[in-house]
Image: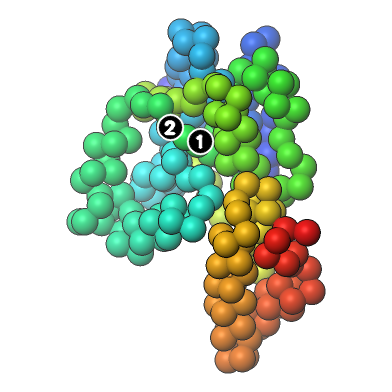
Amino acid sequence: GPPVSTPFPHTTLFRARGVLRTRAGAVETTTLGVLEQALEEDSRLAAVGPKIVGDDGELELSTGRTMSLWNEAWFKLVGEMGSSQGWLFGPHLRRQYAIDRNTDSLTAACLLVRREAYEAMGGLDERFFLYAEDVDLCRRLRHAGWRLRYVAQARLRHLRGGSRSSDPTPAVIAYRASQVAFYAKHRGPLSRMVLRAYLEARYGVGALCGRDADMAIWSWLRGGMPPPDGT
């Protein structure tokens, strides 16, 4: 059937039993029903999420994206190798996203959360803006004993990059600020130290080369980033 558009950057729809959060995208009419059915069938599930594709039809890697040094490096490598369209990882990813399965995180691009679980967690942590609020919520849900499930039959067309449509620098800073906040909240001193060193090296080199965006991000890092111990 025709998609149901969700034009707002972040939409929260409170239903009788669940909380639906979406970012700008188009949800197929059958998707909500499929997600709600999955949530109803297993009382241990806190949240469910659909298959997500971009405007170009490419599969979005929407599960298992918790923030850690290893996991972020892995997804960076997969992206550089062509993601779901690449010859190396593509066949495995397409098979993986063709079946329902439990996962350790889902994306807020489209996320149906059981109201009971959402309210028990106190909702979203407001220190995260635009990025990582979903990863943080999923982590807290799992640590509280809930399960998360990817539902392949449900589908969302994701209008990517709306927050970066003009100047990408504010969105990059928002992402890095949420990344730093997540590491400060959930990772140890060594991981925080490595992240800080990586960010300063990456954007410091760009700033020395005179790249305006990197200079702006470097200035933010030097002025607003907390020390590695998270204090």
Identify the image quadrant of the N terminus.
Answer: top left
Q: Nearer the viewer, residue 88 or 197?
A: 197
Mark 1 Cα-neighbour bin, 10 Å: few <14, some 14–19, many ≥20: many
Residue 123, label in figure: none
Instruction: Calculate the distance from the C-alpha at mark 1 to the C-alpha at mark 2.
Output: 7 Å
Q: Quadrant of residue 184?
A: bottom right
Location of residue 155 in the rendering, given as x and y in whole percent from the top left corner: 43, 30
Q: Is residue 34 visible?
A: yes
Extreme residue in the bottom direction:
209
Q: Nearer the viewer, residue 145 or 35?
A: 145
Q: Callout 2: helix, strand or loop?
A: strand
Mark 2 Cα-neighbour bin, 10 Å: few <14, some 14–19, many ≥20: some
Q: Identify whether 110 is placed above or below 162.
A: above
Q: Which residue is mark 1?
A: 106
Residue found at x 29% / y 36%: 96
Residue 103, label in figure: 2
Q: Identify whether 127 is placed above or below 49.
A: below
Residue 196 as seen in the image, left or right of residue 41: right
Q: Callout 1: helix, strand or loop?
A: loop
Residue 150 as seen in the image, left or right of residue 230: left
